[in-house]
Image (spheres, rainbow, N blue to C red):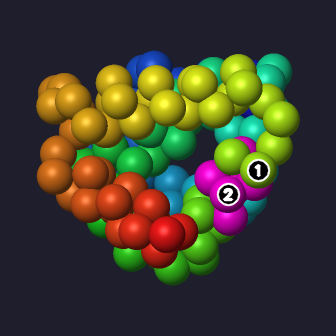
Amino acid sequence: MQIFMLCIGNNAQGLNQSQNADSWFKVFQKIKDFILIAICDEELVNDTLVILHQFLTSPALKFQVYDYEDCRDQLQRSIELLYDGNSEYCKERFREYLEEKVVQRTEDTDNALKKFFKNIIYKMS
């Protein structure tokens, strides 16, 4: 996770460049299972949410990620696993992420991100 944070973390300049989009999307396809399941790990959840958010808000990548059905299905399963589990800390961090980074309008969020999560949560009910 530390390597991912160094490459993708808070400064995702390369992730946002359209000429790198295909390469970064291939990286996402390879690491998505690890990232999406790590939201359930108390030691990894904070970094994981930062990394996930970078992929979900990158202008060059976000629509590829949103349209990637395996990502949506895996994220849905991860959220179900998270809320079926015992880690109140991870649940709280994920809830805070949704409230602060998805629901509230920030400079790197838009309606597409809200719609992405809304569709996943709708499928869960």
**Which circle marks residue 80 in the picture?**
2
Residue 27 in the image, given as x and y percentages of width and height? 62, 56
Q: Write the residue at 51% across / 79% down.
A: 69
Q: Are marks 1 and 2 in contact (CB under 8 Å)?
A: yes
Of the residues shown, which amino acid type is indicated by label 2?
Glu
Q: Residue furthest bottom?
A: 69
Residue 30 in the image, given as x and y percentages of width and height? 71, 62
Q: Is residue 10 left or right of residue 51?
A: left
Q: Is residue 29 left or right of residue 16?
A: right
Under tag 2, what secondary structure?
A: helix
Closer to the camera in the image, 10 or 94: 94
Residue marked by disc 1: 84
Would you place residue 42 above or below residue 67 in this image? above
Closer to the camera in the image, 11 or 94: 94
For the residues marked 1 and 2, what is the alpha-carbon distance in whole angstroms?
6 Å
Decide whether residue 78 is among the magenta residues.
yes
Mark 2 neighbour density, 10 Å: few (under 14) some (14–19) many (20 or more) = few
Q: Is residue 38 left or right of residue 54?
A: right
- Find residue 70 and report its image quarter: bottom right
- Find residue 46 and report its image quarter: top right
Q: Write the residue at 59% across / 60% down.
A: 75
